[in-house]
Amino acid sequence: MSTTIGLLFGSFNPVHIGHLVLANYLAEYAGLDEVWFVLTPQNPFKEKGDLLDEAHRLELLKLALQEEQRFKASDFEFMLPRPSFTIDTLDKLHATFPQHDFRLIMGADNLLAIEKWKEPERLLKQYRLLIYPRPGYSLEAQPQTKGLQVVDAPLLDLSATLIREGLRMGKNLRYLLPHGVYDLIAARGWYK
């Protein structure tokens, strides 16, 4: 019997409660056995600019997920060529773990811009996607394709950019970050 794994890709710069709320919702309501948080060392659509070192982001991610057995911090993309392309990672994950049924977790904003991704037609045809709503992005005009499931996850307009900016300004954002993450960031002086 295969395990159904939701793959939540991201820079997690830093991981925040919005990521955990989404993963929790999908684990409970979308039939996922586990959610793997796949840490992307370098997103091809983002500048490296204020990207915290990948080892530090992985440390924060592991800290954030340590109390939930269904959530796994994955450094799988650390071993792949950079920048990371989702289709390549999915192919490699599928080859490495053929016993798992992978579902790509994607925000409506990314689905509406999927034509900019590497091999979008093959991605949509070959892999199953769980699409969650994002503020300001409507999926009404999006054609439904086999393997694409829209989930009515809670809308949280929270971003890592907002958190980084707040931390730079010296704001106490303890309750926007998973338990222990704020304290580690503060202790190490990250994002200042």
Image (cartoon, rainbow, N blue to C red):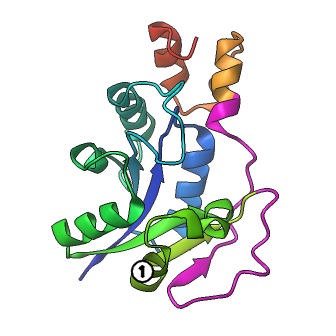
**Residue beneath the point at 58% across and 80% down:** 149
**Residue beneath the point at 38% across and 67% down:** 87
Q: Would you place residue 72 above or below residue 13 in this image?
A: below
Q: Outermost residue, bottom direction?
A: 146
Corner quadrant of residue 169: top right
**Residue beneath the point at 50% across and 8% down:** 189
**Is residue 158 or residue 126 the one in the foreground?**
126
| Disc 1 residue type (three-letter) | Arg
Check the picture and name the quadrant holding the C terminus: top right
Q: Which x, y percent locates residue 5?
A: 37, 67
Q: Magenta stretch: give its range.
A: 135-162
Residue 172 shown left or right of residue 120 in the figure: right
Check the picture and name the quadrant holding the N terminus: bottom left
Q: Is residue 102 visible?
A: yes
Residue topped by disc 1: 122
**Is residue 128 or residue 183 the one in the foreground?**
128
Residue 108 shown left or right of residue 94 in the figure: right
Q: Would you place residue 148 above or below residue 6 in this image?
A: below
Q: Residues within 10 Å of mark 1 (few under 14, many from 20)?
A: few
Q: Outermost residue, left direction?
A: 96
Q: Would you place residue 61 above or below residue 95 in this image?
A: above
**Residue beneath the point at 59% across and 61% down:** 25
> What kind of element bears circle 1?
helix
